[in-house]
Image (cartoon, rainbow, N blue to C red):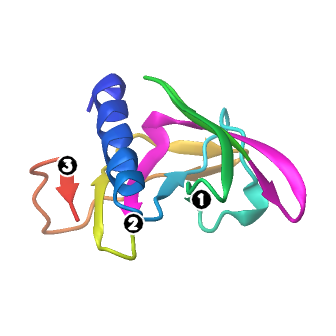
Amino acid sequence: MRTAFKSYLVRSVYEYCMDHGLVPYIVANVVDNDTLPIEHAQVGKITLNLSNQAIRDFTIDHEQLSFSTRFSGKITFVNISIAAILWIGSPQSDCGMGFEVNEAKTLGAKTYAKQPQQGVSSGSKLRLI
């Protein structure tokens, strides 16, 4: 999926959640070029709350999503590439959108890649949740 198109989908789901009083979250792969609190990542992925109470200075463009927030009382600037986003939505309402990421994402010497499952068709790359 082209990153520019994906950024519109991410923004749309984010705005839908905000307009309906839902708490938006994202799940993203941890990528070397991104700025985020790696100590809060698990198995090469991180889940972040995007509500107005949790973040400040939110921006999204065709290449990245960025904001500032607090982790352990310290102000942290977070920058995540659109390509690394795996899911955005609100768990409280079961609304959201998942994205398949085929390319390997690296963090230091470790490589995190989505492994193909045996017997699973490689149909649509977009999955509605």
Distance between the alpha carbons at the discs numbered 2 and 3:
17 Å
Residue 123, image x and y in percent? 9, 51
Q: Secondary structure at mark 3?
A: strand
Label 2 sits on what residue type? Ser
* Magenta region: 69-89
Q: Is residue 32 left or right of residue 65?
A: right
Circle 2 crowding by C-alpha within 10 Å: few under 14, some 14–19, many from 20? many
Instruction: Quarter of the image for the N terminus: give it.
Output: top left
Q: Are marks 1 and 2 in contact (CB under 8 Å)?
A: no
Q: Amino acid at mark 1?
A: Gly
Q: Residues within 10 Å of mark 3 (few under 14, many from 20)?
A: few
Q: Which residue is mark 2?
A: 90
Indicate which disc, 2 or 3, sits on the residue closer to the N terminus. Answer: 2
Separation of marks 1 and 3 at Cα, in angstroms: 21 Å
The numbered disc on residue 126 is 3
Q: Which of the 4 image quadrants contains residue 48?
A: bottom right
Residue ID at (28%, 65%): 95
Amino acid type at circle 3 is Leu
Disc nearest the viewer among 1 and 3: 3
On the image, numbered disc 1 is attached to which residue?
A: 44
Could you say where residue 122 lies in the image, as x and y percent from the top left? 13, 52
Q: Is residue 94 visible?
A: yes
